[in-house]
Image (cartoon, rainbow, N blue to C red):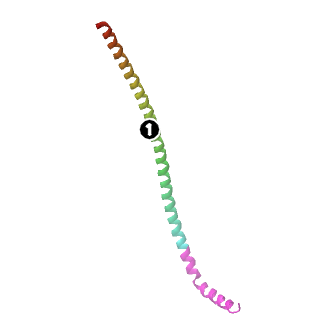
Amino acid sequence: MASIVPRLAAANLLTMQHAAHVAVAAAANSAAAATANSAAGTAGLALLVVLVVGGILLAAAISAARGLAAALAELARFAAMMMSAVVLTTVVILMVLALVIH
């Protein structure tokens, strides 16, 4: 312990001379980091806005696709109903003709 204390004191005295330079460099690095963080924050915010708008547009497209699928299902149901009516009418007409001719 007796040999460590004088060496620690000498190291502290030697580093105090350079502490001012380190403080100036640290302040400059801090300002540069703040500018970089601000730019990164702005880019991150822009990315977030793009993702949210993209999500909203995707949700709208999905909703429109569901509506279109429902409309096409109704159209297919109507076409099947009309085809059934046409086939039934044709069968009845052919039966009546067969009875009249026979």
Which residue is drawn at the image coordinates 46% and 41% (left, top)?
62
- Classify residue 47 as left or right of residue 84: right
Closer to us: 90 or 51: 90
Residue pushed farthest left? 101
Closer to us: 5 or 23: 5
Tell me the magenta residue range: 1-26
Which residue is drawn at the image coordinates 68% and 89% (left, top)?
5
Q: Quadrant of the N terminus?
A: bottom right
Q: Amino acid at mark 1?
A: Ala
Determine whether 17 is above or below 34 in the image.
below
Q: Quadrant of residue 30?
A: bottom right
Residue pushed farthest bottom? 3
Which residue is drawn at the image coordinates 36% and 20% (left, top)?
87
Graded by Cα atoms within 10 Å as few (under 14), some (14 to 19) or many (20 or more), the crowding at tag 1 reads few
Determine whether 3 is above or below 56 in the image.
below
The residue carrying mark 1 is 65
The image position of residue 95, as x and y in percent, is 34, 12
Q: Quadrant of residue 75?
A: top left
Closer to us: 90 or 31: 90
The image position of residue 25, as x and y in percent, is 53, 76
- Classify residue 50 as left or right of residue 16: left
The image position of residue 86, as x and y in percent, is 36, 19
- Classify residue 92 as left or right of residue 6: left
Residue pushed farthest front? 102
